[in-house]
Amino acid sequence: METKKIKWGILGTGRIATVFATALQVVEDSELYAVGSRNMTKAQQFAGEYAVPKAYGSYEELVQDPDIDVIYIATPHNLHVENTLMALNHNKHVLCEKPLGVNRKEVKLLAEKASEKKLFLMEALWSRFLPNIIKVKELVESGVIGDVKLLTAFFSFKSDKGPEHRQFNIELCGGTILDIGIYNMFLSYLLLGKPKEISALAGLSEQGIDTSSSYTFKYNDDTIAAMYSSFLADSPTIAKIHGSKGRIELQHQWFCPGSVKLILNDGTQEQFDFNFKSNGYEFEAEEVVRCLQEGKTQSEMWSLNDSLQLVEIMDSVRKECGVVYPKHDF
Ligand SMILES: NC(=O)c1ccc[n+]([C@@H]2O[C@H](COP(=O)([O-])OP(=O)(O)OC[C@H]3O[C@@H](n4cnc5c(N)ncnc54)[C@H](OP(=O)(O)O)[C@@H]3O)[C@@H](O)[C@H]2O)c1
């Protein structure tokens, strides 16, 4: 039986939209069919570059195209709830960039809407679908490093962006916690679950977004996850999981396609390498296609409950740090 080709629409034409469009080219049973921008010239430029048949000069027109199956939302954080709701209300399945919503209330609203409309919805937490991250989870669950006692994960770089950019702009719900800290917290949630206690500190900009944050999570026993994220310093973006029998190391840019090192206390070492067809974003897109072909409304690998648990963790961290988004947190 012939499988149905999934027609994608991309909403927003910024940096990640171009990266995702590149990855879609290697995804089977997929067609990048339409793009929507606030600006028709930008939409046409994007369409020309990625051979997209349809270009729209507004997000409203994009979501109204009856031939689109799924919309990929690639706008700043503040717009995720509004853009996702609009797509769902026009009966489109949705893959929305991280974070799915900036707080629990927004994620819950979106999950409820998707459920009511019986549509697929997933947060584009691309790292969850990378073979290196899947391997880390398998290794931890296999018990090869014994009981996990300490997880460290860092995501820090010196940003050259100005205060108007989405990284620093409070109106666009900027700050490291939602933008890059989310990866650290995702890893600790994936491997250790929801923490029992959270302590966090952040340096805030004049606008009130966190420019550097550190957060430590405590679990049931003597297990700790210690993490930081920053836009102010170039620092190795690495993650390590230490257990009673050894450790797992993820190389620089640990949240990207890469290799995994297993180092046991007896000196044994093993490195795991993987093949990537494109830039790594193909794995999340393949998961969406698989779910849609199977008639699923959620991914079992990264469910809406996972997104809800993660945003609850980020809400707690933001609360500790005093990061408030005026038009969203009330
Ligand atoms: N998964 C990852 O590895 C990864 C990496 C980077 C970013 N992201 C996520 O992807 C999303 C977009 O990030 P990005 O780096 O692609 O941002 P970006 O380059 O600034 O692009 C965002 C796009 O959103 C649209 N937009 C609508 N309203 C806007 C506004 N008020 N200000 C700025 N842009 C606006 C614009 O598209 P039009 O002008 O075409 O309408 C713009 O090009 C964020 O949620 C971010 O967290 C994910």
Image (cartoon, helix red, strand yellow):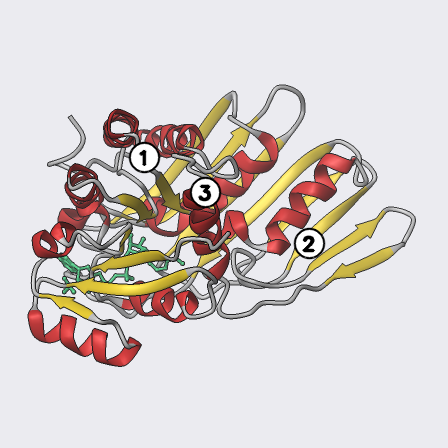
Residue 119 occupies quadrant: top left
Query: Residue 291, labelled with which disc?
Result: 3
Q: Are marks 1 and 3 in contact (CB under 8 Å)?
A: no
In the image, taking residue 147 as reference, residue 16 lies left or right, namely left
**Which amino acid does the dot numbered 1 rest on?**
Arg
Q: Are marks 2 and 1 in contact (CB under 8 Å)?
A: no
Above or below, 212 against 315 in this view is below
Mark 3: secondary structure: helix
**Which amino acid does the dot numbered 3 rest on?**
Cys
Determine which residue is flagged by label 2: 249
Above or below, 14 against 329 in this view is below
Mark 1: secondary structure: helix
Distance of label 3 from label 2 (alpha carbons): 31 Å
Queried on whether the Cβ of the residue with tag 1 lies below 8 angstroms from ligand 1, the answer reads no
Mark 2: secondary structure: strand
Residue 143 occupies quadrant: top right
Q: Residue at x 22, y 45 (%)?
A: 80
Ligand 1: give its quadrant.
bottom left
Distance of label 2 from label 1 (alpha carbons): 28 Å
Q: Residue at x 13, y 48 (%)?
A: 171
Tell me if I can see residue 71 in this picture: yes
Query: Residue 318, labelled with which disc?
Result: 1
Tally the marks.
Answer: 3
Tell me if I can see residue 207 in this picture: no
**Which mark is in front, 3 or 2?**
3
> Crowding near pointer 2: few (<14 within 10 Å), some, many (20+)?
some
Q: Earlier in the sequence, mark 3 or mark 2?
A: 2
Residue 232: image x %, image y %?
36, 61
Query: Residue 141, labelled with which disc?
Result: none
